[in-house]
Amino acid sequence: MHSLHELQATFATAILERDSSRIDWSVGGDNRRDRLAIYIGNVYHNLREALRAVYPTVDRLVGQQFFDHAANRYIRENPSQSGDIQRFGDRFPDFLANFHAAASLGYLADTATLEWLVHEAFHAADHAPLAFSQLTDLAGAACTTLRFRLHPACRLFASSFPVLKIWQVNQPAANSDETVDAGAGGDWLLVHRIGFAVDIQPLHAAEFAMLDALRGGRAVDDAYELALQQDPAFALGPFIERRILDSTIVGFDL
């Protein structure tokens, strides 16, 4: 007699490995394998479509047949760890980076990372802008003691590939046959939800260094030093003002 936990674990393994023979003994009826095959097919189809919804650019770059093949492998090797299907594809960029069939497409994993960050930003928590009353306190604070907090829907990404351009020319509304030189240089990007839309902003190296340091909890003076290493002419005041106004910075600690 199998316990409920053993039955559930065996059933899940059989579904992921697409091997109905593992569990056909637990299903009644003469056509049990056929019915299990339909169930397995539906599970894989739904998970593939969930991945395709998050990674439409990857799908367009490689084509449906390749994407389905990669997705099937991913589903089998990376079982969902959450009841929320929106989290299912979090390891897909890492999977693609190590997927032998995609070895010649060096930019593919980074493109997938950008798409996942867009997905994360869209579903992230909201936060009110920095209040004017807090700005009064900010004016009298010692800059070296400040630690700015970024909006929960902000994501930063540095890539050695022109992933923003790759993403842009593969959007449904682009209607473009433009090709992108994958060796044309990299991007520093801020992915930020504004209202109900996700915006991807290209950054200069100094801006990225500053925001990345602030996101990591560094004080303003430390983050500013890192920015100056990238650009000695980096202007701190206008940068802080702009990022407060666009709600990238939404709070601070002294």
Image (tube, rainbow, N blue to C red):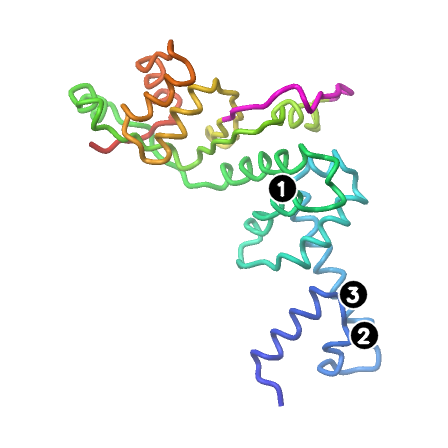
| Region rendered in magenta | 175-189
The residue positioned 79% from the left and 44% from the top of the image is: 66
Position of residue 223 measured from the top left corner of the image (x, y, whole percent): 33, 25
Q: Secondary structure at mark 2?
A: helix
Residue marked by disc 3 = 38
Position of residue 6 measured from the top left corner of the image (x, y, whole percent): 59, 79
Above or below: residue 125 compared with residue 158: below
| Disc assigned to residue 54 | 1
* Magenta span includes 57: no
Looking at the rendered structure, the kind of residue marked 1 is Val
- The single residue placed furthest to the left in the displayed view is 140
* Labels 1 and 2: the sequence-earlier one: 2
- Image quarter hosting the N terminus: bottom right
Residue closer to the observer: 145 or 81: 145
Residue closer to the observer: 117 or 235: 235
Residue marked by disc 2 = 33
The residue positioned 35% from the left and 30% from the top of the image is: 214
Looking at the rendered structure, the kind of residue marked 3 is Ile
Residue closer to the observer: 121 or 210: 210
Position of residue 73 measured from the top left corner of the image (x, y, whole percent): 72, 54
Q: Secondary structure at mark 1?
A: helix
Looking at the rendered structure, the kind of residue marked 2 is Arg
